[in-house]
Amino acid sequence: MHTTALDATTLEKLISAAVAAPSVHNTQPWRYRLDPGTATIEVRAATERALRQADPVGRALHVSVGAAVFNLRVAVAHFGWEPVVRLLPRPAEPDRLASVRLAGPPAGGERHGPDLYDAVWRRHSSRLPFSGRPVPPAVLTELTEAARAEGARLHLPGPAETARILRLTAEAERFAVSDPARRAESRAWVREGARDGLPGVVLGPRDAAGHLPVRDFSALRPADQRPSVPFERHPLIAVLSTTHDRRADWLRAGQALEHILLLATLRGLRASLLHQAVEWPDIRWALRDPRGGTEHVQMLIRLGYGADGPASPRRPAQDVLASGDENWG
């Protein structure tokens, strides 16, 4: 489908697609504005929704916004335009993280790769147990190529390295639960009736067997109310990394993350994000492959087949879309 003019209904669909992206603690730290003169959607950080304790330098915020930018790219292409993306377009305005210009139809009218638009609406994290069904090598290859297309790398470690990564994740989760400031911050975002009347994250079951350090979100439930559900004994954990660790790299990592997640959804996979270990600088450094890996780990992704599970709510498009003449300050 190609549309020559951007009408209000299509703009709302584009922004709704962007808002459907994952974000740390479901903070949804983004705002959008259309510049009608250049047919450009500008993306800015909503810094009031940042996590001051868990994400003091804003790395996770940038990854979250990068994922939203990828969804916006997918939706723009779906409606017939070529998305032209600029990261950090105005250095003097550090909160302006990206712009997506709606250019003419793709050269030759051809689309490269699968249309991921339907997956935008079906994708959400599953914190439920996965089955032991193996993921076909061809699908894993597709996912690694998706990361590479966005300037990132997806590594699939072996059993010993996966076990080490999960131990580091469990250690990071223990640190977070024992930190009063982080507990308070988590509680503010994930409890029922949190800011904006939205529960930030749907709580999942615990892995009683200890095979998988599923985040308990600061122990918001009493211990006797947390269900004990067996998780997969040998989880498939993918490591998303970048060569450098600058703001633009974080945004690229977010685009790679969402490309992977949408493609996984299209292939029938479920996914959840293990973010705990990358929230602590020393543990994040330890996530590097001890055999000589020099890349910067941006996210751990658990992949597999299993139940869909509930989705966390999203803010309406009109809540994050500024008018063309509105002051962003």
Image (cartoon, helix red, strand yellow):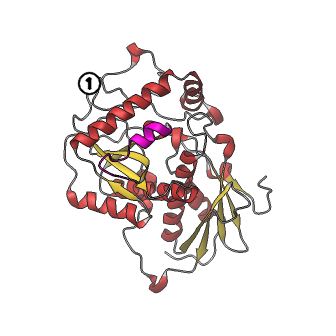
Task: Give residue 201's position: percent from left, percent from top.
Answer: 50, 35
Outermost top residue:
224
- At x 43%, y 54%, the residue is 257
Residue 328: horizontal and vertical position, in percent?
76, 55
Residue 198 in view, yes or no: yes
Q: Is residue 181 within the magenta segment?
A: no
Residue in the picture at 46% in, 33% down: 202
Instruction: Return the x and y of residue 77 as percentages of the image width and height.
Output: 50, 70
Label 1's element? loop
- Residue placed most toward the observer, 304 or 162: 162
Q: Residue at x 27, y 32 (%)?
A: 231
Q: Amino acid at mark 1?
A: Ala
Q: Is residue 100 above or below residue 158?
A: below
Q: Nearer the viewer, residue 316 or 303?
A: 303
- Image point 80% across, 62% down: which residue? 325
Q: Which residues are magenta?
A: 281-293
Tell which residue pokes out farthest to the front in this image.
292
**Relative to 48, residue 323 above or below:** below
Q: Quadrant of residue 223?
A: top left
Does the rendering let one see residue 218? no
Quadrant of res 204: top left
Relative side of 266 to 83, left or right = left
Q: Which residue is mark 1?
A: 209
